[in-house]
């Protein structure tokens, strides 16, 4: 009996002494089959391996058992919960089902659907990067990071990461190299996946998310007659070249083929462009993989990038602060920005700029600079209020702690739910960070 022929109602025992019941067949992948099941009275997913498709089946069994002992790293990971007993010379593991409001990343890349806004898109990137930062800090490597690993909620960019059976300590690799077009050049050439090569794959996914074309697939790569093994190794391993390489333009974009590049690359901040350029530089790809940007660098750049997206005060549509004077991308009118809040960097921590535009928020991560070892949560602590007609702005305390600010030598307290009127040059103490007003 083939795995895909497991019938509805089939009961399978698990290693934890539970049982599951097959409800329906969901999908077939390269490694196995996925079913919807009932487990402990709850709907769950079962991945059942194809023994002929997985070389190190015993390794996966032992690795998943260890993952179950450790538990999910955060709620962003669809983590194994239990193992089946052997069935038909193989086994499977139980995990949470993907909620219906989450879509495959591939569906976004294929333009079947779209995130609700650039803000949500940047939030999606922050969730992905933060999750892998947590995974790497725990000593794990993902090893097979690609476009098939993410489920994304379109309205806000929340992310769930699947296929976590590949996750293992860096010194205990699964033997899976990865997916073509997502593997780092060193892995393409036969090297072993690790945290550094994860960072390359992560940057490929981010580039696809924002720019909607592959970072190494410019005119040179697309001119080959057939992307066979020889050319795969050549363009992704031996001679990779960034589509936006600042020195060698021979693999640059074509205006007819790479329309998304011409539309989206200019929207990236200089910091974002620099991180992509560093990742896909000849030095990082071919000489020194430690040059790939760290997750914290992406987190900081993405948080600042997200801060520049907000609703135009005039037409209420999403716009992006990238010019002086600022002009709305939707209505074409110049809109007022009353100034900037500057979260001052101290002791090596990063600083941020927040535009004084209605409803723009200061988030916890602006203040703690991602010092928390936990998953990114996007928790707002302050919200900008404006009166455009009067040219005034305030900052509402939407946290649960008091703020302190000084005017004329006197110190005042801003309690939760209170709004402080902003004046040029004043400094507000929020937690352990100073926020300076520039108007």
Image: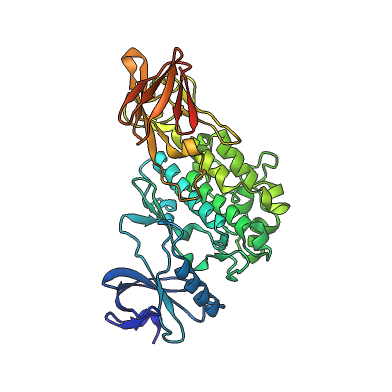
Front-lying residue, 221 or 286: 286
Q: Is residue 169 above or below residue 295?
A: below
Quadrant of the rendering where the N terminus is positioned: bottom left
Residue 46 lies in quadrant: bottom left
Residue 424, can we see it? Answer: yes
Q: Residue at x 41, y 46 (%)?
A: 377
* Horizontal and vertical percent position of residue 5: 35, 82
Q: Residue at x 38, y 78 (%)?
A: 16
* Horizontal and vertical percent position of residue 423: 42, 16
* Horizontal and vertical percent position of residue 220: 64, 50
Count of residue discs:
0
**Which colouring convention does the figure follow?**
rainbow
Left or right: residue 267 versus residue 384 is right
Q: Residue at x 56, y 50 (%)?
A: 203
Q: Is residue 47 above or below residue 75?
A: below
Left or right: residue 257 versus residue 413 is right
Residue 331, can we see it? Answer: no
Quadrant of the rendering where the C terminus is positioned: top left
Left or right: residue 428 versus residue 418 is right
Q: Residue at x 43, y 38 (%)?
A: 364
Front-lying residue, 212 or 147: 147
């Amino acid at each position: 009996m083939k795995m895909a022929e497991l019938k509805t109602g089939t009961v399978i025992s698990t290693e934890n002494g539970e049982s599951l019941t097959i409800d329906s067949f969901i999908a077939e992948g390269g490694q196995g089959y996925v079913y919807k099941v009932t487990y402990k009275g709850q709907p769950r997913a079962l991945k059942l391996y194809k023994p002929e498709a997985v070389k190190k089946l015993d390794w996966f069994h032992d690795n998943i058992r260890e993952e179950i002992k450790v538990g999910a790293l955060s709620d962003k990971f669809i983590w194994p919960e239990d193992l089946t007993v052997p069935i038909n010379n193989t086994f499977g593991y139980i995990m949470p089902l993907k909620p219906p409001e989450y879509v495959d990343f591939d569906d976004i890349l294929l333009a079947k659907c779209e995130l609700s806004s650039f803000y949500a898109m940047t939030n999606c990137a922050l969730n992905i990067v933060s999750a892998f930062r947590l995974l790497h800090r725990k000593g794990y490597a993902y090893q097979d990071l690609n476009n098939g690993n993410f489920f994304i909620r379109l309205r806000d960019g929340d992310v769930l990461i699947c296929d976590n059976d590949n996750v293992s300590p860096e010194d205990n690799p699964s033997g899976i190299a990865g997916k073509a077009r997502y593997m780092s050049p060193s892995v393409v050439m036969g090297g072993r996946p690790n945290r550094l090569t994860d960072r390359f794959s992560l940057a490929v996914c981010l580039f696809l998310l924002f720019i909607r074309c592959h970072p190494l697939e410019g005119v040179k790569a697309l001119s080959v007659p057939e992307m066979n093994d020889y050319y795969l190794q050549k363009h992704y391993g031996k001679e990779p070249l960034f589509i936006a390489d600042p020195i060698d333009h021979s693999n640059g974009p074509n205006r007819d083929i790479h329309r998304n590049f011409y539309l989206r690359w200019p929207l990236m901040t200089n910091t974002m462009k620099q991180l992509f350029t560093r990742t896909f530089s000849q030095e990082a790809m071919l000489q020194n993989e430690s040059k790939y940007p760290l997750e914290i660098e992406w987190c900081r750049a993405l948080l600042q990038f997200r801060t520049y997206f907000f609703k135009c005060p005039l037409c209420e549509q999403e716009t992006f602060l990238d010019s002086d004077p600022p002009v709305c991308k939707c209505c074409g009118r110049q809109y007022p920005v009353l100034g900037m809040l500057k979260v001052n960097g101290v002791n090596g921590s990063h600083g941020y700029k927040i535009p004084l535009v209605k409803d723009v928020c200061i988030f916890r991560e602006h203040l703690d600079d991602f010092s928390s070892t936990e998953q990114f949560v996007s928790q707002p602590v302050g919200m900008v209020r404006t009166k455009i007609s009067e040219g005034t702005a305030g900052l509402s305390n939407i946290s649960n702690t008091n703020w302190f600010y000084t005017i004329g030598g006197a110190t005042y307290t801003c309690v939760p739910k209170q709004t402080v009127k902003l004046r040029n040059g004043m400094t507000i103490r929020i937690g352990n960070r100073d926020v300076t007003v520039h108007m």
